[in-house]
Image: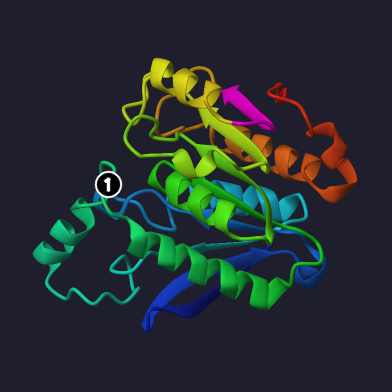
Amino acid sequence: MIEEFVHFYSDKLKLEGILTYNEDMQSSPAILLCAPHPNLGGDMDNNVIAGIARVSANRGFASLRFNYRGVGKSDCHVKDIARRFQYWDISLNGGDYTDAVADTHAALDFLISQIGVTHGIFIAGYSFGAITGMKVGTESNNVKAFAAISTPFGRYNLDFLQECKKGKLFIYSRNDFAATVEDTMRGFEGLPPPKILELVEDSDHFYRGQEDRVSQKVCVFFHMSDERNWNKLQGISSFSIFM
């Protein structure tokens, strides 16, 4: 497995990221990985995001994980740390998160510039990253399918998904502070197919000790969403990935 530190630009801000791949990166399908909210410690080294990068590389994917503006060594137009916290706080519970979406689009464009689109592009996001990832996944014609882990249902308006016919995987756990089981079920039921809802037992929002299991579910789903297997998802409202 190879990890390459890279940078790219979003709104003229220099953002940092890590490309993870095996030696055949140019012939691999690719996953853009979207981290949790910056004000909740979300960065590209998050255990779930880094876990997917590692596991997906072993399963033949390349991936890019990155830091939003103001996180880690990524530039930000807000220099003062306290003001930066306030700036990000607006997007914490459903407020304006357009800058995070812009950063995610920039990351996707960079990933495509490195990989191309021949072998498939996917997005996986965790918590707040599930929102930004799904938003960009619906807006980009290059993204085949996306996975959302611990989606904060009930906190964000997800109307942008109502016309989305791409494959959608939702992974959730019990005792998750980001969304109750009831909110998750209600939000999932209101979304169009094809879609999958997967419960990770004996876990909570952080999936500590369950990173590999979550990552394997994401990889299996993306393999199924490849063009060769797309007929398995067409017209299906939900089913299970047994891992």
- Residue at x-position 35% and y-position 29%: 154
Task: Decide which of 212, 30 is in the foreground and name it.
Answer: 30
Q: Is residue 47 visible?
A: no
> Callout 1 environment at 10 Å: few (<14), some (14 to 19), or many (20+)?
few
Residue 118 vertical position relative to residue 231 in the rendered view, above or below: below
User: Percent x, y for residue 60?
Assistant: 78, 55
Circle 1 sits on which residue?
40
- Residue at x-position 72% and y-position 44%: 222
Task: Decide which of 173, 139 is in the foreground and name it.
Answer: 139
Membership of 198 in magenta stretch: yes
Task: Decide which of 11, 35 is in the foreground and name it.
Answer: 11
Magenta-highlighted residues: 192-199
- Residue at x-position 58% and y-position 53%: 137
Q: Give the quadrant of the C terminus.
A: top right
Residue 211 vertical position relative to residue 60 in the rendered view, above or below: above
- Residue at x-position 74% and y-position 64%: 22
Q: Is residue 67 rendered to the left or right of residue 28?
A: left
Badge 1 element: helix
User: Percent x, y for residue 120?
Assistant: 76, 58
Q: Main SS of the magenta segment?
A: strand
Q: Amino acid at mark 1?
A: Leu
